[in-house]
Image (cartoon, coloured by chain):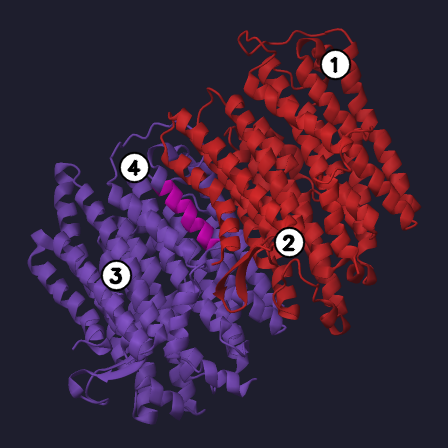
Chain colours: A purple, B red
Amino acid sequence: MPDTAFWAVCLVVVPLFFALICFVRSDQAAVLGLLAAGLNALAALAMTVFFVRSGPLRYAIGGWQAPLGINFSIDGLSVLLVAMTAVTGLSVSMYARGYFSLRIGSAGEINRHGHQRAFFWPVWLLLWGALNGLFLSADLFNVYVTLEIIGLSAVVLTALSGKPAARLAAMRYLLVSLLGSCSYLFGVALLYRSYGILDMAALARLISPAPLMWASLALLTTGLLLKTALFPLHFWLPPAHANALAPVSAILSGLVVKASFYLMLRLWGDIFAQVLPFAAYVLLGVLGCGAVLWGAVQALLQKRLKMLIAYSTVAQLGYLFIALPLIRLDPGSSAWEAVILLIMSHACAKSAMFMAAGSIFLKAGHDRIDDLAGIKEVLPISSFAFVLAGVSLMGFPPSGGFVGKWLLLGVSLAGGEWWWGVMLVIGSLLAAGYVYRVASRLLVFKVTFFSRRQSIPPVMEWSAVLLALLALLLGLLAGYPLGLLEAGSPFPLHACREVMP
Amino acid sequence: MNWGGLLLVMILLSSLVPGLIIFALPEKSNRPRTFLNLGGAFLKLLLILVMIIGIYKGRHFAVRWQLLPGIELALNSDPLAALFSTLSTVLWLLTTLYAVGYLEQSPNRRQFFGYFSICVTVTVGIALAGNLITFLLFYELLTLTTYPLVTHRGTREALAAGRVYLAYTLSGGAVLLVAVAWLQVLAGPVDFGGQPVLASVAATHELQLIVIFFMFIAGLGVKAALVPLHGWLPRAMVAPAPVSALLHAVAVVKAGVFGIVRIVHDVYGIGFAAGLNLLLPLSILASVSIIYGSLCALREDDLKKRLAYSTISQLSYIVLGVSVAGPLAAIGGLVHLVHQGLMKITLFFCAGNLAETLGVHRISEMNGIARRMPLTMAAFSVGALGMIGFPPMAGFVSKWYLGMGALATGKMWVVAILAVSTVLNAAYFLPILIGAWFKPQECTWSEQVVAVRLETRWMLLVPPLVTAFLVVTVGLLANAQISPLAWVKLIVGREFGP
């Protein structure tokens, strides 16, 4: 009888297995890849259903217990992020199917495009499996392994575009990613030296202030901040996200940066929460504010559409870090719910935006914002998807971004630290500014001749618009996913309530 | 969901669904589009009638949808909601008819009518919003859905106006968001139509409540075009005439004013707000807007811009009426919500007719125009005289109650403001009327409508005549049981009642 654990194992094994097959049968890669995406989504759905029925779970694979074996810890947060990855991943996969079938091009390009198609699917499935593994893992070393796979496959995907700019960006990404992983691994090693255990739940009980603990926390955090691209460590992100192929950009911005932020949440929100001083959270929050301002201002200045979206990711990641001090401040669970809602809604909206931008790029042959006027006439659905995703990023009601912002605003005002909330509002006004820059050109009625009259397959347009719509509706339906969180009680939500009534 | 709640949802869907279908229809299918538009408008009117009859019979319609604990969307049918939603629905029907005529042969009508329908959905959503967060939701959506209408023509000027419009309204929306969130932190979720709950937190948080009140006024004042937050309104005149008509009579500016009424009446409560000394600054702000708007209107030669400044002035009557803090003045203010809508939409329809038929945009070109377009100018005159406050037009009733209310509360300076404003209104409207009716034609007009039996297309002519008729009727029959005045008395009676 399959249960939560069975489906959780499937979520890691199926993508890895299909990644291998795709690699061997590269002529059938797209079909196999889509099949794997579908199976993955089904497995995620099944796991969610079983999770709702039977609640949180710890599972030792093959019966091997902690020090030797691989343990899964499945709580509400894991389930939500796995589901988010499944939904976004499925849309991106469908988009990618259209995207790669389209790019035939001239004789010289056929070779390169065939190459891209052959490598995209296995690497993307590898990345997907690692993401699932990271969200489900119970101990910090397994997390390191998945983190490393995620980093390397993301670099490969970035370089897939083959353009010099993309290769340069991928190289920089590789160095940053390796540096981050090294730093993280050192941190893990120090923890193991101190406590002899790496299980997250056990560590949370054992942690006590000690020099070695502080050193390991500093190393872990530095590694993760590098990978999450928190301002001012964001320098590698915009070129990498902007120069990659469209489906890759969607994956990188929507999902990959969320993986390392998820670990930040686990470390700072749970494991080390008891010993960390509030000032440390404030420091991260201040860096988050810097990210919101810097990312938005840079986005306002960009000339290219994909660069603008990439800088918007820098800004939106800032929101997540602003939420960290608020999580500490909040006696209830609204700040938790808000940050998770923001993560999910950004994943959907940003992927949709990159996908729409990719279609626009193919159609227009360029992505210079100033020359995109009138694209609505030839690509109505993609333009609509872009604007819809933009509305979500701006935190307009009823999007998930709005509900998240609203909750955080409430927490910051109730806690007397209103400046965090005001920062969020300023951030969304700035976001409105850069979304408007694009939208005002996309939506204007103007007949322009676009030289590269490539017809975009409907699946590329519709996958983007549906994902954008989901981001928008996430606000109205927020109760359902966040209900899972309550059921799983992944964090000291209720413990916190008891401590600070 | 109960049947009453379903009715409210249906009222929203009756324009949302046609709007969405219109987006899906191809640009060329004009007949289905017009059918959907008018069908939706009639259906909405019918549903609103059902709701009003229900309210008369003492029924209460409400529906709630919880997003998360503490965040609840609610629709509610209190009498004030019914007043505003009826106004929106009636004027939407007429404006749709007008827009079909106005935009004949022009490009990109699919987008126009799609957003137009959604815009009305959102406006009625504002009317029916049952708590602050629902109001905020629709208020913000209104910004987004009106932007494509304002920039519909896609010219450089239209885009510039759209940018200014967004900059103003989004900033206003941000201030409003903070205010709503802050109030919710202090006092919990605030429902409209119940007993104001703020008195319980006043003792400890008086200063915060005062600051929040002015944040509300600042946030809502942008759309209500209170001076000095009015800068976007005259620029937004580049929009097509039906949009200006709708924006000025029901949708955007009214949403702002309606919000202020909600804040004063339902959130703070008149007595409580007066106790905190919040209403005097508000009435001073309104008075400044009244005088300043009129003075600016005097200077403008462009007809639509003059009307825009006149809107700034007239809207503040409503705010003034609410902030004088007496039942009679409140009646005057609230009834002006309807009356100003009827009069202003008439004027904008007529201005659109002149531009569309004869290419006339400036007041200096209007001499002798009444001989060419007597029906249009007759409607215009009714609207203008109503604005000045001639009996028995609608505007007179509003001003009468405002004046009586000011006297009853002993605020002589308000009466003075009203008198000065009336003189100014006359000063910028009467020369137009005199020129149009009595002076000879001075310049040649470029006839743009190929000879038709009437002075212009019937679709352009009927809506202003109907609204002009309504302007006179609601004035003459002000004391009838189904007039807006009677309805407003009911609302105010509840507010000031025992």
Q: Which mark is residue B436?
A: 1
Main SS category, magenta section: helix
Q: In the drawing, does residue B98 fall left or right of residue A62?
A: right
Question: Which range is magenta?
Answer: A382-394
Residue A161 in sight: no
Work out whether disc 1 and disc 2 sit on a shared chain: yes
Q: CA distance from mark 3 to mark 2?
A: 67 Å
Q: Is label 4 in a helix, a strand or a loop?
A: helix
Query: Given this view, does label 1 or label 2 mark the residue nearer the observer?
Result: 2
- x and y percent of residue A66 in the render? 24, 89
Q: Residues within 10 Å of mark 4 (few under 14, many from 20)?
A: many
Q: Quadrant of the C terminus of chain B?
A: bottom right
Work out whether disc 1 and disc 4 sit on a shared chain: no
Q: In the drawing, does residue A9 fall left or right of residue A373?
A: left
Query: Given this view, does label 4 or label 3 mark the residue nearer the observer?
Result: 4
In the image, residue B434 sits, relative to residue B75, either above or below, namely above
In the image, residue A333 sits, relative to residue A37, either above or below, namely below
Q: Is label 3 in a helix, a strand or a loop?
A: helix
What residue is shown with label 3? A155
What residue is shown with label 4? A363
Q: Are marks 1 and 2 in contact (CB under 8 Å)?
A: no
In the image, residue A198 sits, relative to residue A107, either above or below, namely below
Q: Which mark is residue B58?
A: 2
Q: CA distance from mark 3 to mark 1?
A: 74 Å
